[in-house]
Image (cartoon, rainbow, N blue to C red):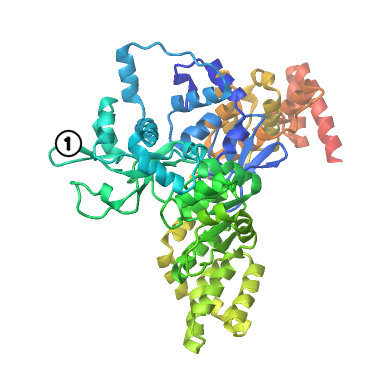
Amino acid sequence: MDYRLGLIPDDKIAEIRDRTDIVSVIGEYVTLKRTGVNHKGLCPFHNEKSPSFNVNAQKQFFHCFGCGKSGDVISFISELEGKSFMETLRELAKRSGVELPEERRSPKDEERARAAESERAKMVRLHDLVAKFYREQLASPAGNAARAYVESRGLDEATCEKFHVGFAPAGWEALSRHLEAKKVPVELAERAGLIRRRENGTHFDTFVNRVVYALTSPMGEVIGFGGRVINADGAKGAETKVDQPKYKNSPETIIFKKGENLFGMHLAKHAIRRTGRALVVEGNFDVMTLHQVGVDYAVAPQGTAMTAEQVKLLKRFSREVVLMLDADPAGRAATMKVVHLFVEAELPCRIAQLRAKDGKKQDPDELARKDLPKLEALIESAQDCVEFYFEQVASTSPPTVPGRVQAIEEVAPLLRTLRDPLARDLYCDKLASLLKVDAALVQRALRAAPAQERKMRDVQPQAAAAVAAEPIRQVAQRRISLTHYSLLAFLAQHPDYWAKVDASSLKDDQVRSLVASAQESRTFDAPWLLNACPAEISDAVAKALGSDEFAGDEDANKTFESIVTSIRFPSDLSSLMQERSAAIERGDRELTEKLNARIIAVRRSSR
Ligand SMILES: [Zn+2]
């Protein structure tokens, strides 16, 4: 990315970067832990199990030693959110209180700018507009029944505001007409799946006579809607003779992908990071109620079964997940799928199951409103997900030999997924005792049955895909010599010395070209250097730029001289002496003196 292409002056861009805390911005996407001068976390750009993603607050850059991605806070957001450089810059400017020069545009320029706006930005703007419209409709007289429904769910005004709860009116054309009046291009609204085209070319609304709420990105942008029908009669119209589904979501668009987001994540993420725990419930309305009563770390899988993507999103923020399942037993296959996702991702997961009360099914929603302490106790006492699954298998398997064989075979692939051998042994014991068989039997079954692996893959394509998605670095990394490393680490702390480096004296071709291009463009900040740096040495350069070895150096001049000298002159004595003889012959006194000093230093260090 070249900043110099923008219309915004460089110093403004620098100001925005300086006033933005890169750790707190990236921390909204990735759970970061402090390690020395750096912050570390799981890379959001590739799939990984142990953190190799580093953020350096002082130098304002990030670098992943797993996949090699690096940059500053601006490139981080625009990459991850798929936003343009300008969009990201404006957003960060607003956040950091930096005033950007408002471009004065003629109507024609304005139109051109709009045309150039990314499809994504257009979509987000449209969803914003529609969310406002639905909110207004809920407050209007037409929204009476919807308001009554919302009240019956116990949701207060503040909660409705937070989750953009609104009303999609009956009549099939309310939104279509509103968008027309607002001059929204119909094609855009069609692509967003919010209106649909009839055969005769006119349009009708997707959400009709429903209480609607926003589906959002982890950043809080509205990217789709979900809606619950208010009463079946009102929703039936001329367009359809079939019954409307009780719940309905926006179709997939370029900004809304099923199974990639979690309902409520943008509101829950702060609490999840703070407590280290996420609560996953099944219903979106459950999430709203839970937040209202203070269980603000609750999210829902947005109407789908849990996916590997969603588990990955959870892992970015939490250390542990509690899954709250409905009273009706989910069934072995469904439980196995979800347990496998968490084991595969190595994200600890516990399961809390709501019990049916007097034959009546209980919702987290209801429990939260009626008996919060009981709900909290349920979360605290939730059971480890693997054990939960074992118990389910054991209790539903016939106590016969074939029944036990089948049970062990079913569980074996999951056990084999566990990377920790101790945990695997303990789980084997647990399973053996539940099935009333010898633990050695389970161990043996685990070593055999490789065919099960294949079966597991079939059942769990997403988990398999996640493993395959482990990154392959495009370019193999090489080391740079300690002296070159020291030079870069020194320069990172003492930027005034950049101009003093004699690039031609550097022995490492790639470091030399990096230093030369930095001098040429007079840019010495870490994100720029990492961007300009040859791919093979990006890890080494990132390490050097992020190091604080030379911070608070008393005599920077002396250090600089000694680093430069040690690069210029080899450290083996015989070649040093040869060079000294040549210097004496040439009568180069300055060089002779430097070589003398170097020879003394090398002799001393080799003693
Ligand atoms: Zn990475």
Q: Quadrant of the C terminus?
A: top right
**Figure quadrant, ligand 1:** top right
Please provide percent x and percent y for residue 296: 58, 46
Q: Residues within 10 Å of mark 1 (few under 14, many from 20)?
A: few
Q: Nearer the viewer, residue 101 or 470?
A: 101
Q: Nearer the viewer, residue 326 or 469?
A: 326
Q: Quadrant of residue 198?
A: top left
Query: Residue lying furthest left in this view?
Result: 200
Please provide percent x and percent y for residue 278: 58, 51
Q: Is mark 1 within 8 Å of ligand 1?
A: no
* Residue drawn at the location 56% of the way across and 43% of the way down: 269
* Residue drawn at the location 55% of the way across and 39% of the way down: 536
Residue type pointed to by label 1: Thr
* Residue drawn at the location 48% of the way across and 13% of the way down: 101
Residue 60 vertical placement versus 147 (above, below)? above
Q: Quadrant of residue 134?
A: top left
Mark 1 falls on what kind of element?
A: loop
Q: Which residue is mark 1?
A: 202
Please provide percent x and percent y for residue 598: 80, 29
Q: Quadrant of residue 172?
A: top left
| Left or right: 142, with 260 as reference point | left
* Residue drawn at the location 72% of the way across and 30% of the way down: 569
Q: Nearer the viewer, residue 181 or 360?
A: 360
| Left or right: 529, with 226 as reference point | right
